Amino acid sequence: MTNMPRPFVPNDQEKLLALESSRFLAAHLGNEGALEVRIDDSDETVVIPSSALQLLQYVLAQMAEGNAVTLTPLHAELTTQQAADLLSVSRPYLVSLLDEGKIPHRKVGTHRRVLFRDVMAYKDASDTRRRDALRELTEQAQELDMGY
């Protein structure tokens, strides 16, 4: 992920400001219009499209909780370690997924590169399979009157 801003952890003052801003945006998310923001001590304003407000509100909510935040474009290429970290798996396990063709990738010399969107597509599919299996197990447990 070259040229990506590094995650940062907000200080206490930034957390409070983020909390206030997040609450304000949350109250206006249902509106279809854009949001006009005035720059402090200036007559300048910037218009933020409604499509960006939901993302901005999420980032502010995370900051308010003191969480580090970063954004990654869907087309970003990840190293195998970055992709493994996103999936919460070991790098060797991720490499085995790549070698089995379960996640598309390309090679740059001897190094593998994975698109962020492909990692997220694999994660979404894996999460769906996990939820479906859990639902099926729950249904079986209820049918067998196992106390669940």
Image (cartoon, helix red, strand yellow):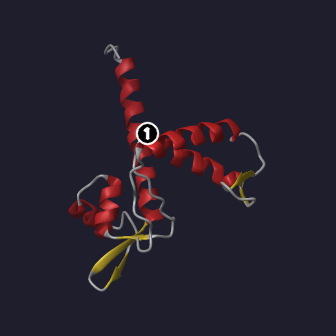
Picture residue at 38% right of the left edge, 65% below the top:
103
Q: On screen, 134 above or below 18?
A: above
Crowding at label 1, few (<14), some or many (≥20) Cα neighbours within 10 Å?
some
x, y percentage for residue 57?
58, 45
Q: On screen, 50 above or below 100?
A: above
Kind of element beneath mark 1: loop
Front residue of 96 and 61: 61
Q: Which quadrant, please, contains the C terminus?
A: top left
Q: Is residue 21 left or right of residue 43?
A: left
**Residue situated furthest bottom in the rendering:** 109
Q: On screen, 24 above or below 105?
A: above
Picture residue at 48% right of the left edge, 46% below the top:
14
x, y percentage for residue 15?
46, 42
Front residue of 70 and 122: 70
Picture residue at 36% right of the left edge, 74% below the top:
113
Q: Mark 1 is on which residue type? A: Glu
Q: Is residue 78 left or right of residue 51?
A: left
Front residue of 60 and 52: 60
Picture residue at 46% right of the left edge, 43% below the top:
13
Quadrant hosting residue 85:
bottom left
Front residue of 76 and 123: 76
**Residue situated furthest right in the rendering:** 33
x, y percentage for residue 79?
33, 70
Residue carrying label 1 = 65
Q: Which quadrant, please, contains the N terminus?
A: bottom left
